[in-house]
Image (cartoon, rainbow, N blue to C red):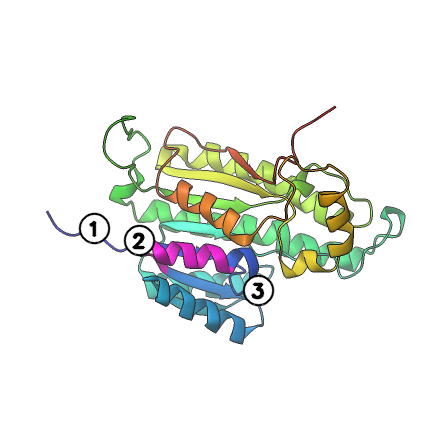
């Protein structure tokens, strides 16, 4: 039997935080990873080194996912380096430049957030899905099943959207972010329905309060909510590695009879408690 081809992944926004942790976790599984970044080449190079130390291979590619030309260049560079794409992780995302009251929201700020957090991922997913469909892989059987007591799950080709609890938790001073994340939830459903017949699974991971640079500016607020406000059944900050573990579970095929599903990595925030 010929050896299986090396599994490949494109991870957007992978220079730091959740994206970096995901790239490293995939490296531990032997993936060849495209580490996409916006402008921090040094951080991207560090992620590349960590992926390689973990046992994988990695290449850093600069591109703004919110820009049409950059998305096209990113896909071209990815296919040139990898030959095919098994996994797309839509992780790149930005916060509003300023936190303004909903009644004072600025249109330019709105467009910037939507371009990066929703429009960009939508059209990048469209492009990657076309490439996946054009190059069927043996690992992508939509009808494969694994007995409970049988062999290890079959790795899947999949698209995973790293979303946020802001998809349903309203924050009136960052409305653009919430709207984009709510849109990503529907985007997950749409691509899951369209691509199931192509043997491509689509999932959403919905992190809660994760210790990243984006959340650092509200650390005092979140510390109080977590440790004094009884907001989380699991009262601690989430870590990027918590999200990475969920990604690994999905790409390894632990949920072969599921697509369009959401995994809440939020310490129980989504629970409604009295």
In the image, the segment drawn in magenta is 20-32
In this rendering, the answer to whether 176 lies above or below 150 is below
Q: Nearer the viewer, mark 2 or mark 3?
A: 2
Residue position for label 2 = 7
SS at circle 2 = loop
Q: Nearer the viewer, mark 3 or mark 1?
A: 1
Q: Point out the image quarter for the C terminus.
A: top right
Where, by quadrant of the figure, is residue 82 drawn? Answer: bottom left
Residue at 63%, 46% in the rendered image: 236
Let me know if residue 28 is in the magenta part.
yes
- Cα–Cα span, label 1 and label 2: 8 Å
Precedes in sequence: disc 3 or disc 1:
1
Let me know if residue 238 is in the magenta part.
no
Q: Do residues under tags 1 and 2 come within 8 Å of each other at their CB atoms?
A: yes
Asked if one can make out residue 233 in the rendered structure from this viewpoint, the answer is yes
Which is nearer the eye, 20 or 229?
A: 229
Residue position for label 1 = 4
């Amino acid at each position: 039997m010929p050896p299986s081809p090396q599994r490949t992944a494109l991870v957007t926004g992978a220079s730091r935080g959740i994206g970096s942790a995901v790239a490293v976790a995939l490296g531990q599984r032997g993936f060849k990873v495209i580490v996409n970044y916006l402008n921090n080449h040094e951080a991207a190079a560090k992620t590349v080194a960590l992926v390689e130390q973990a046992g994988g291979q990695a290449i850093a590619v600069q591109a703004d996912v919110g820009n049409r030309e950059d998305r096209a260049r990113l896909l071209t560079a990815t296919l040139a380096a990898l030959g095919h794409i098994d996994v797309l992780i839509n992780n790149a995302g930005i916060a509003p430049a300023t936190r303004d009251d909903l009644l004072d929201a600025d249109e330019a700020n709105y467009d910037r957030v939507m371009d990066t957090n929703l429009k960009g991922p939508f059209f990048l997913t469209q492009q990657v899905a076309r490439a996946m469909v054009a190059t069927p892989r043996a690992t992508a059987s939509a009808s494969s099943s694994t007995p409970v007591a049988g062999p290890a799950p079959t790795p899947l080709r999949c698209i995973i959207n790293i979303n946020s609890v802001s998809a349903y938790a309203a924050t009136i001073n960052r409305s653009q972010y919430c709207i984009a994340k709510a849109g990503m939830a529907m985007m997950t459903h749409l691509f899951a329905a369209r691509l199931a017949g192509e043997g491509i699974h689509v999932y959403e991971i919905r992190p809660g309060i994760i210790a990243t640079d984006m959340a650092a500016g509200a650390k005092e607020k979140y510390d109080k909510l977590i440790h004094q406000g009884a907001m989380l059944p699991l009262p601690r900050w989430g870590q990027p590695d918590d999200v990475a573990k969920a990604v690994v579970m999905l790409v390894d095929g632990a949920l072969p009879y599921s697509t369009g599903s959401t995994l809440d990595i939020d310490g129980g925030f989504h629970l409604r408690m009295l």
